[in-house]
Image (cartoon, helix red, strand yellow):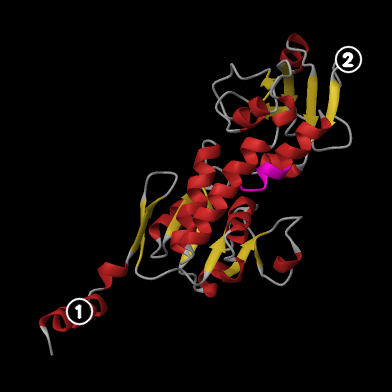
Amino acid sequence: MNNLLQRCLLLTALALCNPAISEISVRDDLDREITLATPAERIITLAPHATEMLLAIDSGHKIIAAAHFFDYPPSMRDVPKINTLGGLDREALLGYQPDLVIAWASGNRPGDLQWLADSAIPVFMSEPKDLAAIAATLEKLGALSGEAEKGKYAANRFSTRIADACQQRRNSPMESAYYEIWPNPPMTIGGKHWLNEVLQLARLRNIFSFVPRAVFTVSMESLLAHPPQVILTTRPAPAHQQGNARVILASPTLGRPGPRIAEGLEQLCQAL
């Protein structure tokens, strides 16, 4: 046996004996290091946007349970749903024996997030701050699920689609906009929400971008003091019509920090 062949066999043996060589390690949106010895095969998603990310990288078959939601695609019809709104069903989650949980840092209950942090289950905390972070998360989840190349492809496709979504409005004048999250009490987005970047691509300026918060309840006085040119709502009609503002029915996909934002942005720019 020649020396080159001996070296190759030795390196192969070392790789098999040392799991660290094949470890997968990424940092989540809270800058926590998540390390898996092997790609995740049993994944629970505790936010709709996380489910959509796994579907985008062709890892939907690895989802063993997902947060309740209203418009999952048909491929998710038979996937068990896990309660998150009234508190996480912890017993059910443990019963599924996941090897990875994708949680929503600002969308899941703090007590449930702490319980997950104290468990032995690897948890990826999702909290995208901007569109670039969404693309980065697609790549990271691709790596964690053993679909690194598909993760990169999905990230590039998302970024390209976002860049092309509103080409017809690039020379349009900027218009002021109010984004209605909830009608009563009125709830909207402030300057720290990632949707501001999305609105700017559509040549819209959030009338409450000066508020240093992500989501907040706004008073009727503030609404009257800042009349928008455009009102965005996911309901048939806004709860608070203001002057001559144009009302645009926005796709619910626009409000979720996942890959389907591109779809919602395309629809928004066509409507404008």
Q: Residue furthest left?
A: 3
Whether residue 259 is in magenta: the answer is yes
Q: Nearer the viewer, residue 58 or 215?
A: 58
- What residue span does the magenta drawing correspond to? 258-263
Q: Residue furthest top?
A: 225
Position in image of residue 143 (x %, y %):
44, 60
Tell me the SS state at disc 1. helix
Asked where in the image residue 272 lies, by quadrant, the reply is top right
- State the residue position of label 1: 8
Whether residue 2 is in magenta: the answer is no
- State the residue position of label 2: 244
Q: Nearer the viewer, residue 261 or 186?
A: 261
Instruction: Write the residue at 71% across / 68% down.
Output: 75
Name the amino acid type tagged 2.
Asn
Instruction: Write the residue at 36% across / 49% down.
Output: 32
Q: Residues within 10 Å of mark 1 (few under 14, many from 20)?
A: few
Q: Residue furthest front?
A: 2
Q: Mark 1–mark 2 contact, CB under 8 Å? A: no
Position in image of residue 192 (x %, y %):
55, 27
Q: Is residue 235 left or right of residue 199?
A: right
Q: Label 1, label 2: how many angstroms apart (C-alpha)?
A: 74 Å
Where 214 falls versus 175 (above or below)?
below
Where 241 falls versus 115 (above or below)?
above
Name the amino acid type tagged 1.
Cys
